[in-house]
Image (tube, helix red, strand yellow):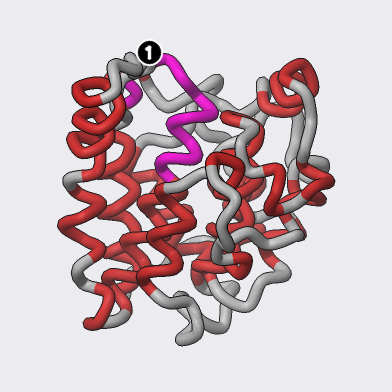
C-alpha cells in the first residue's frame, strides 16, 4: 500500500507558490487527510438532502433546508486558515479536523467558502452574514487553481465548486444507493449553463467551472473507493 504523509505534513507542505495544488498533489493531500477521520461518509447524510444543499443557495428561497449540510463550525473556520490558503490547508484547520468524517469536514469548508464567494447562505448561519467588502477581505487569500484548470478566474467560486463535487463524489462512491449522484454532478456544469444562461439569460461571467467540478467529483469518488 502506498504510504501517504500525515495531515500534519499536509499543512506544512509547500505547494506551488500562488496556486492550489495540481490535481495529483491535491488528491495525495486529501488521502493523507482522510486518515485522520473515523469515517469518510456517515450513514445519516442522505443523498437527496446533500444534493439539495450543494446545488441551491438557502437565501434564494424561504423553505426548509438540510441544516445538517450547513455546519455552524463554518463560522469559526474562516478565522482559522492562514493568510494564503490551499484546499488541504482549509481542511486541516481545527474546525474541519474536529468533524467525525471526511465528508462532514468537506461540508464545513464548502459552506464557509461558498458564503464568502456568493453571500447567499446567511439564513443557514447568521454569524456568516457579512457585506461584500468583508467577504472579499476574508476570501482574498484563498488561492486560485492553475489557469488551465480554472478557465474562469474565480478562485472562491472554483474552490467551493471543487468542495461541492468532492462531497458528491464521496457520497456516490461510498454508498450504492447514492450512485445516481455521479452522473448528475458530472453533467452539472452543462445543466447550470442551460438553466442560468440559456433559459434565464444570466451570463456565467466566470464560466461553468467544468474542469474544477469534474476534478472534485473524481477525487471524491476515488477517495471513497480506497
Does the segment drawn in magenta span residue 157? yes
| Residue 120 position (above or below residue 84) | below
Q: Report if residue 6 is visible in the image.
A: no
Q: Report if residue 15 is visible in the image.
A: yes
How many numbered markers are drawn?
Answer: 1
Residue 33 falls in which quadrant of the image? bottom right
Q: Position of residue 111 (x, y in %)?
A: 60, 49
| Residue 78 position (above or below residue 71) | above
Front residue of 190 and 201: 201
Residue at the image point whose x is 58% and y is 29% from the top? 117
Residue at the image point whose x is 46% and y is 20% from the top? 154
Residues in magenta, as a range: 150-162
Q: Secondary structure at mark 1?
A: loop
Residue 65 falls in which quadrant of the image? bottom right
Residue reaching furthest front?
62
Report the quarter where the N terminus lies.
Answer: bottom left
> On the rendered structure, is 84 left or right of 170?
right
Front residue of 160 and 56: 56
> On the rendered structure, is 148 left or right of 47?
left
Residue at the image point whose x is 22% and y is 82% from the top? 176
Q: Position of residue 87 (x, y in %)?
A: 54, 43
Identify the residue position indicated by label 1 in the image: 205
Front residue of 157 and 37: 157
Q: Position of residue 172 (x, y in %)?
A: 28, 69
Residue at the image point whose x is 32% and y is 30% from the top? 209
| Residue 88 position (above or below residue 96) | above
Q: Position of residue 104 (x, y in %)?
A: 57, 68
- Dot 1 crowding, Cα within 10 Å, few <14, some 14–19, many 20+: few
Amino acid at each position: 500500500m502506498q504510504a501517504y504523509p500525515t495531515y500534519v505534513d499536509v499543512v506544512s507542505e509547500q505547494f506551488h507558490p500562488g496556486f492550489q495544488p495540481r490535481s495529483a498533489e491535491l488528491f495525495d493531500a486529501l488521502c493523507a487527510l482522510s486518515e485522520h477521520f473515523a469515517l469518510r461518509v456517515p450513514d445519516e447524510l442522505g443523498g437527496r438532502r446533500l444534493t439539495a444543499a450543494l446545488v441551491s443557495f438557502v437565501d434564494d428561497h424561504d423553505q426548509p433546508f438540510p441544516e445538517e449540510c450547513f455546519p455552524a463550525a463554518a463560522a469559526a473556520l474562516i478565522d482559522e486558515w492562514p493568510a494564503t490558503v490551499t484546499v488541504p490547508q482549509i481542511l486541516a484547520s481545527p474546525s474541519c479536523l474536529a468533524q467525525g468524517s471526511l465528508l462532514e469536514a468537506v461540508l464545513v469548508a464548502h459552506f464557509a467558502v461558498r458564503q464568502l464567494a456568493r453571500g447567499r447562505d446567511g439564513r443557514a448561519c447568521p454569524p456568516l452574514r457579512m457585506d461584500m467588502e468583508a467577504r472579499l477581505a476574508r476570501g482574498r487569500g484563498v488561492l486560485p487553481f492553475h489557469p488551465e484548470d480554472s478557465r474562469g478566474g474565480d478562485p472562491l467560486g472554483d474552490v467551493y465548486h471543487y468542495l461541492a463535487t468532492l462531497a458528491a463524489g464521496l457520497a456516490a462512491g461510498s454508498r450504492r444507493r447514492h450512485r445516481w449522484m455521479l452522473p448528475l454532478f458530472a453533467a452539472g456544469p452543462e445543466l447550470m449553463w442551460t438553466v442560468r444562461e440559456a433559459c434565464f439569460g444570466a451570463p456565467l461571467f466566470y464560466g461553468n467551472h467544468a474542469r474544477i467540478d469534474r476534478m472534485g467529483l473524481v477525487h471524491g469518488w476515488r477517495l471513497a473507493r480506497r
